Image: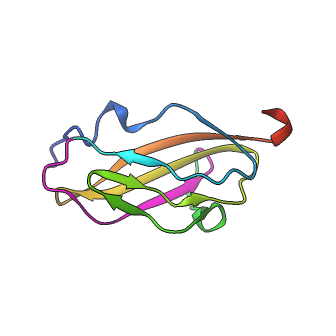
């Protein structure tokens, strides 16, 4: 049985993030409740809401990294208008968790 820690709590989902088409950003995700550390390389999935199709190869570039207890995501690229969901997983204290889900709304440049 897996015991939940503060790594997996109500703060897993972030507030809506609004970006514009063409924006190139990376997210820094601080992870609380870590005892021994974040090991390996975290993973990220870029999806349309209510789907499981990973579109990361289209909309993300670069690599994931960890510094202390903070995860830095890949950078966005080729963003298109629409609603998106980003899921970040990492191995923390020996167990794999979804540590952040980010809802993203990408608007056309003229609409922002």
Q: Is residue 9 left or right of residue 94?
A: right
Residue 5: quarter of image:
top left
Would you say 26 lies left or right of 83 here? left
Q: Residue furthest front?
A: 67
Q: Position of residue 61 (x, y in %)?
A: 59, 66
- On screen, residue 92 versus residue 76, left or right, reads left
Residue at 76%, 45% in the rendered image:
81
In the picture provided, is 15 more to the left or to the right than 67? right
Determine the residue positioned at 62% across, 46% down: 84
Residue 101, compared with residue 61, is above or below; it is above
Rendering colour mode = rainbow
Vertical placement of residue 15 versus 94, above or below = above
Q: Can residue 28 be found in the magenta stretch?
A: no
- Residue 63's x, y, as percent? 48, 68
Q: Is residue 37 magenta?
A: yes
- Percent position of residue 42, x then y: 37, 62
Vertical side of 54 occupied by 102: above or below:
above
Q: Which image quarter: residue 57?
A: bottom right
For the C terminus, which image quadrant?
top right
Instruction: State the image coordinates of residue 37 (x, y, percent, origin top left).
Output: 19, 57
Which residue is farthest right?
A: 110
The number of discs equals 0
Q: Residue at x 67, y 60 (%)?
A: 77
Of residues 104 and 73, the one nearer the viewer is: 73
Magenta region: which residues? 33-49
Q: What residue is shown at x 56% (from left), y 61% (from top)?
A: 54
Decide which of 25, 38 is in the foreground and name it. 25
């Amino acid at each position: 049985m897996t015991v939940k820690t503060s790594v997996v709590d109500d703060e897993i989902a972030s507030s809506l993030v609004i970006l514009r088409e063409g924006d190139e950003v990376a997210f820094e995700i601080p992870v609380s409740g870590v005892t021994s550390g974040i090991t390996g390389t975290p993973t990220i999935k870029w999806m349309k809401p209510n789907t499981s199709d990973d579109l990361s190869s289209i909309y993300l570039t670069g690599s994931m990294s960890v510094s202390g207890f903070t995860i830095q995501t890949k950078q966005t690229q080729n963003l298109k208008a629409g609603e998106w969901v980003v899921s970040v997983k990492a191995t923390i204290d020996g167990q794999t968790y979804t540590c952040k889900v980010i809802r993203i709304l990408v608007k056309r440049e003229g609409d922002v």
